[in-house]
Amino acid sequence: MTRHLPVAVALEGYGWHPEAWRHTPDRDSVLCGPYWEALAGTAERGLLDFITFDDGLAPQRRRRPEIDPRWLAGRPDAVLVASRVAPTTEHIGLVPVANVTHTAPSQLGRAIAVLDVVSHGRAGWQPRISASPQEAALFGRRADVAADPFDGAADAVEQARALWRAEPVSPQGQPVVAVLAHNRRVYEFASGSADLVFITPGGDGVRAILDDVADVGGAGLRIYADVFVSSTDLVDARSDAHTFNGGAAELVDLMIRWNKLGVNGFRLRPSISAIDLPWIVDEVVPLLQSAGRFRDAYRPSETLRNRLEVVDR
């Protein structure tokens, strides 16, 4: 029997292209709940596995402190967004980004546990570290350039997991922890702390990344490839993810080919959420279903951990 191919979607502002706001028709504010509810509803209509909600301490998704007028400025708290859409969805997993460098692990652990309760076992968490001086300054701190931020991140994740074990109010017991990784040091962090890892392959680099993850002890991790997806020719060469610009059949071919190499699933980043997310749901998903590689319905009362078949830690 051919296995189901997991597909998730990453949501960020109006989309992953920095100027997606210019191309979004009839746009509601990203600071309003109905905007996110509509996107989550579309993703759930497409039977996708889960949504990640991006976030950061800076007002824009860029590393520089200056505000660029071409980029969207202003970002809602991802955990609050996930909590807002939880009652309006029934099946899709909800995985917000939350910073571990400047937030108490107990606060993070409780917030994700509450999300798991209100979503009936569909919560996850994508920890993010901060090493920039301007973000440290927001908290009256200095960035410690001598310290390895991933050591502190690993401690924070373990403290959150300990809280979940000590206060078993979460329907899943352990909400799913996912890490975005670009290099070997982050693969090490993911292998010790996460249930799944998002990798960012370029071109034919998939096999090398899979080998690196295995070399650092990540053989038990679920590995998802991040793909920046555009159906309108609006691409961003600066994206850290693999950039795709083409037709639905080409994207499906790419996904099946990488799956044969050892990638477990995919997290698609829509260039323009209002346009590319419906394209994924209405064009890509039916082709995967026709190939026998995607579900026709959700299983009732399924937790995110069970759906993703991640191993308990």
Image (spheres, rainbow, N blue to C red):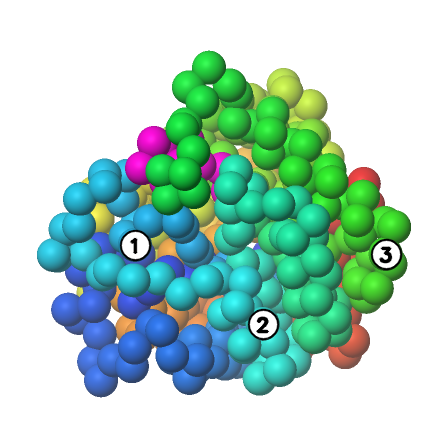
Give the residue type that dot 3 points to: Glu
Residue lying at 38% horizontally and 79% vertically, measured from the top left: 32
Q: Could you tell me residue 82's position as x and y percent?
A: 55, 69
The residue that label 1 is drawn on is: 59
Q: Quadrant of residue 79?
A: bottom right
**Neighbourhood count class around disc 3 (C-alpha, 10 Å): few under 14, some 14–19, many 20 upward:** few
> Which residue is the extreme one toward the front?
140
The residue that label 2 is drawn on is: 83
Q: Earlier in the sequence, mark 1 or mark 3?
A: 1
Residue lying at 34% horizontally and 31% vertically, measured from the top left: 133
**Neighbourhood count class around disc 2 (C-alpha, 10 Å): few under 14, some 14–19, many 20 upward:** many
Give the residue type that dot 1 points to: Pro
Q: Earlier in the sequence, mark 2 or mark 3?
A: 2
Q: Nearer the viewer, residue 52 or 226?
A: 52
Q: Quadrant of residue 6?
A: bottom right
Give the residue type that dot 2 points to: Ser
Q: Nearer the viewer, residue 161 or 289?
A: 161
Q: Secondary structure at mark 2?
A: helix
The residue that label 3 is drawn on is: 167
Q: Could you tell me residue 252's position as x and y percent?
A: 44, 57
User: What residue span does the magenta drawing correspond to?
Assistant: 128-136
Label 1 and label 3: CA atoms lie apart by 34 Å
Q: Quadrant of residue 29?
A: bottom left
Q: Nearer the viewer, residue 74 or 287?
A: 74
Q: Secondary structure at mark 3?
A: loop
